[in-house]
Image (spheres, rainbow, N blue to C red):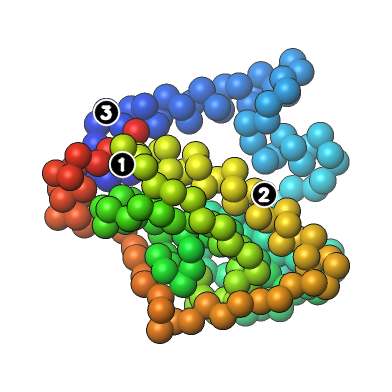
Amino acid sequence: LFELYGLRSFVIQVFDFMKAKLLNKISYIFPIRKYYSVAKIFKDNKIPIHYPANVNDQQFVNKLKDLEIDIVISIACPVILKIPLLSQAKHGNINVHGSMLPRYRGKNIAFWLLLNQETKTGVTVHYIDDKIDSGKIINQQEVSISSNETVDSLYKKTVPLGGDLLIKAVNLIKQNQVEPKANDPIDGTNFSDPGKEEIKKFRSLGKSFR
């Protein structure tokens, strides 16, 4: 992250992270309206939490089987979910992704969108299959990218939208009203971690992370 962001943006990122951690701890002692962690939301709503070292581990997969889960929701998951896990949910597995699929599959999407000087993007909720961001699309919505957009400001646009689309997608699944759209690999583009040359070009274009 330091190599990607550079010193200034990295320090700001660390400060924001530590601030959120501190406010989250305070929220367990004093009532605070805003939530700073998913764990606190779960605790307040008496929802059990599990912290597997590896979600694809058979022990955790067995736990999901015992729970007879309805749906798996993946958000910013750093690993590929494998078939044994994906076979457990009664109503399927869905993921929230920060682009208008099938374009911009993969990770570090905000970076690549700005590097390629895109003027719009969006958020997609899609079913998960055994490949990366390639399952059928449940819903998606576009957002504009301004000329002075940063990686951080673009995330702040897409994350709340992703939450709204996720709620709508879950309700469509509950009501059995999903009309999935194709996520055609022919139209897809794939991205991963940028290298030093891409980071250098990003900065030469006047783009920034914060």
Can you give x and y, in whole percent of width and height, for residue 94 in the image? Answer: 65, 66
> Which amino acid does the dot numbered 2 rest on?
Asp
> Which amino acid does the dot numbered 1 rest on?
Ser
Q: Is residue 116 above or below residue 175?
A: above
- Judge by depth and name the residue closer to the eye, 123 or 64: 123
SS at badge 2 = helix
Which residue is located at x 34 percent, y 39 percent?
Answer: 150
Q: Judge from the rendering whether residue 29 lies leftward or rightward of residue 131; answer left or right.
A: right
Residue identified by numbered label 1:
147
Can you give x and y, in whole percent of width and height, for residue 98 in the image? Answer: 49, 56
* Disc 3 crowd, CA 10 A, few/some/many (<14, 14-19, 20+): few
Q: Judge from the rendering whether residue 169 lies leftward or rightward of residue 130; answer left or right.
A: right
Can you give x and y, in whole percent of width and height, for residue 14 in the image? Answer: 40, 30
Quarter of the C terminus within the rendering: top left
SS at badge 1 = loop
* Residue 192 tag number: none
Q: Are marks 2 and 1 in contact (CB under 8 Å)?
A: no
* Disc 2 crowd, CA 10 A, few/some/many (<14, 14-19, 20+): few
Q: Nearer the viewer, mark 2 or mark 1?
A: 1
Residue identified by numbered label 3:
8
Is residue 207 shown to the viewer in this render?
yes
Residue 84, quarter of picture:
bottom right
Q: CA distance from mark 1 to mark 3?
A: 21 Å
* Residue 164 tag number: 2
* Disc 1 crowd, CA 10 A, few/some/many (<14, 14-19, 20+): few
Is residue 69 shown to the viewer in this render?
no
Q: Are marks 1 and 3 in contact (CB under 8 Å)?
A: no
Q: Is residue 200 above or below residue 52?
A: above
Q: Is residue 19 above or below residue 10?
A: above
- Judge by depth and name the residue closer to the eye, 147 or 55: 147
